[in-house]
Amino acid sequence: MEDKSFNLLTKIYTELTGKIDNIQYEFTSRMEYMHTELTSKMDNMDTELIGKIDNIQYELTSKMDNMDGKIDKTHNSICKLENVVTRIENDHGNKLNALFDGYKQINDRLDRIETEVSKHEEVILKRVR
C-alpha cells in the first residue's frame, strides 16, 4: 500500500508541478504581452505629445513673428507722427513769431500815430484858446 500511496503522491505532485509550470508560463506570457502593449501605447503617446508640442511651438513662433511685424509697423508710424508733429510745431512757431512781429509793428505805428495826434491836438487847443 505504501507503493500505491507513494505513486499517487508522485502523480499528484507531477500534475501539480505541471499545472504550476503552466500557470507560471501563462502569467509570464501575459505580463510580457501587457508590457509590450503598454510600451507601444506609451510610445504612441510620446509621439502624439511631441507632435502637439511641435505644433504649439510653431503656432507661437508664427504669432510672435506676426507681433514683431506689427510692432515694427507701429514703431514706424510713431516715428512718422513724431516727424509730422515736429514740423507742425516749427511751422506754427514761425507763424506765431510772424504774428507777434506784425502785432509789435502795428503797436509801434499806433504809438507814433498817437504821438502825432497828441501834437496836433495841442496845436489845435492852442489856436482855439
Image (tube, helix red, strand yellow):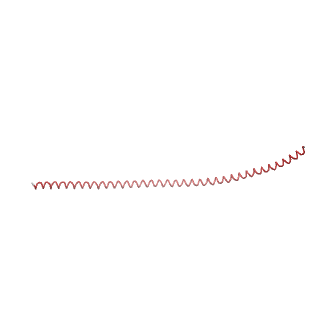
Which of these two is toward me, 6 or 28? 6
Quadrant of residue 24 within the rendered picture = bottom left
Return the residue found at the far top. 128
Which of these two is toward me, 102 or 53? 102
The picture places residue 91, in percent across and down from the top left corner, at: 68, 53
Which quadrant of the figure contains the N terminus? Answer: bottom left
The picture places residue 31, in percent across and down from the top left corner, at: 28, 54
Name the side, left or right, on which 78 lies relative to 118: left
The picture places residue 30, in percent across and down from the top left corner, at: 27, 54
> How many numbered discs sit on the rendered protein?
0
Which quadrant of the figure contains the C terminus? Answer: top right
The picture places residue 29, in percent across and down from the top left corner, at: 27, 55
Quadrant of residue 8 within the rendered picture = bottom left
Q: Quick check: 34 above or below 129?
A: below
Name the side, left or right, on which 45 lies relative to 83: left
